[in-house]
Image (cartoon, coloured by chain):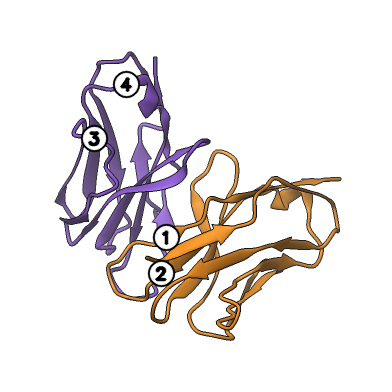
Amino acid sequence: DAGVIQSPRHEVTEMGQEVTLRCKPISGHNSLFWYRQTMMRGLELLIYFNNNVPIDDSGMPEDRFSAKMPNASFSTLKIQPSEPRDSAVYFCASSVNRALQPQHFGDGTRLSIL
Amino acid sequence: GNSVTQMEGPVTLSEEAFLTINCTYTATGYPSLFWYVQYPGEGLQLLLKATKADDKGSNKGFEATYRKETTSFHLEKGSVQVSDSAVYFCALSDGQAGTALIFGKGTTLSVSS
């Protein structure tokens, strides 16, 4: 079975540019999570969705960040405009929306903002 | 609120040494506990889990026992290998459907031959 698929794997862009990260969850999973990982702050939950509906976006750092889940098989995380401090590895994870179910992570997008 | 505290790393061991990575938690109710592992360049993978007090989760030679009296879920392995070098994350779920995991900061393990 295919796991969580993220694209791109790497992104390098200049500050001020719009960045869009993409995620395809595992088929049948109805919870989706976006995380950011940096050396300084570790793994941070940005936002998560249940059944395509955003449940908690309190981890989204600023208005420059937005996330959507237009259907059960696709989600995007957008940064506009991007800044150097947004450089990090961004992970998407999905799970079945039942108690005690583990999250399955993608391999992440390594984002570098110059 | 709920939280997870892991021992600071890095942990550096020789092959075949005994490993302990400490994890303690603060939670209301009856949480479930997890250990995830992250190999270089990859996402996190579930290593093991325990869903109630005194449960022991195990996988790939790793074990962790859910201790409610000490609010701990320490990860152990009797004999580590070079291939175990990774970052290990302790995580907590409040046990409700559709809620996010709470992760510790991660502990880096480096095993040398």
Residue at image location 43% in from the left, 76% down from the top: B31
Query: Quick one: B44 or A64, which is closer to the camera?
Result: A64
The amino acid type, in three-letter code, at marker 1 is Ile
Q: Position of residue B87 (x, y in %)?
A: 61, 49
Both marks 4 and 3 on one chain:
yes
Residue at image location 21% in from the left, 30% down from the top: A64
**Picture layout, residue A112 above or below residue B11:** above
Q: Colour of chain B?
A: orange
Q: Position of residue A94 (x, y in %)?
A: 34, 57
Disc assigned to residue A62: 3
The amino acid type, in three-letter code, at marker 3 is Glu
Q: Chain of mark 1?
A: B
The answer to which of marks 1 and 2 sits earlier in the sequence is 2
Disc assigned to residue B93: 2
Q: Secondary structure at mark 1?
A: strand
Side of A80 relative to B1 (left or right) = left
CA gap between label 1 and label 2 equals 6 Å
The amino acid type, in three-letter code, at marker 4 is Glu
Q: Is residue A110 visible?
A: no
Disc assigned to residue B102: 1
Q: Secondary structure at mark 4?
A: loop
